[in-house]
Amino acid sequence: MPNSRSCFPYHKCINDPKKGNPQHALKDKGVIDSGCLRHMTGNMSYLSDFEELNGGYVAFGGNLKGGKISGKGKIKTGKLDFDDVYFVKELKFNLFSGSQMCDKKNSVLFTNTECLVLSPNFKLLDESQVLLRVPKENNMYNVNLKNIVPSGDFTCLFAKATIDESNL
């Protein structure tokens, strides 16, 4: 069960009257790889197979107790279904975890213009296109900079985790 430090998304809000309210524009959309370890929504109507939980708290918006996990369910889209989606009533966004998608054997590819969620049967045709390969350990992708930077004696953590999981 996640504790109070499961999610640390940061949303910079600029209220430009010409562009409308960006938070309102995201209300019925989702953010992928928001820094959350688990999928979450504040809209119970998206969830099927809902079950109530007395879960922990998740931090967001600068508040360590931003919201309480009170249930979980599934979001079914047909092509890509999301299991174990936590319901957090106080959440104003739908947050989708790239790491949790990879747990289902999908590949998630971020480019400068889009995010692609690839099927479990996706095969990389040209291994020479891979510039960096980082194994997933303890729900984090740990980059050892000794392998990619000529000098330095430190490790960079490339994913967010709870204090307990990261041992920081």
Image (cartoon, grey):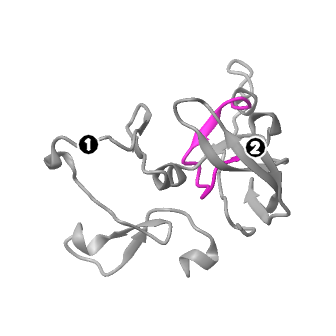
Q: Quadrant of residue 161?
A: bottom right
Three-letter amino acid code of the residue under disc 1: Lys
Task: In the rendered view, tell whether residue 156 sits above or below residue 13.
Answer: below
Label 1 element class: loop
Magenta stretch: includes residue 33: yes
User: In the rendered view, does 55 fall on the left or right side of 135?
Assistant: right
> Which of pointers 2 and 1 indicates the residue nearer the eye?
2
Residue 58 seen anywhere in this rendered image of the structure: yes
Q: Residue at x 57, y 50 (%)?
A: 97
Q: Which residues are magenta?
A: 26-40
Magenta highlight: main SS: loop
Magenta stretch: includes residue 167: no
Residue 12 seen anywhere in this rendered image of the structure: no
Task: In the rendered view, tell whether residue 75 sits above or below residue 165.
Answer: above
Q: Which mark is residue 49?
A: 2
Q: Residue at x 81, y 39 (%)?
A: 44
Q: Quadrant of residue 120?
A: top left
Residue 24 percent location from the top left of the image? 76, 29
Q: Residue at x 73, y 69 (%)?
A: 3
Seen from the viewer's position, the closer of residues 103 and 10 is 103
Q: Quadrant of residue 156?
A: bottom left
Residue 129 percent location from the top left of the image? 18, 45
Three-letter amino acid code of the residue under disc 2: Asp
Q: Quadrant of the C terminus?
A: bottom right
Residue 145 percent location from the top left of the image? 30, 71
- For marks 2 and 1, the one nearer the N-term is 2
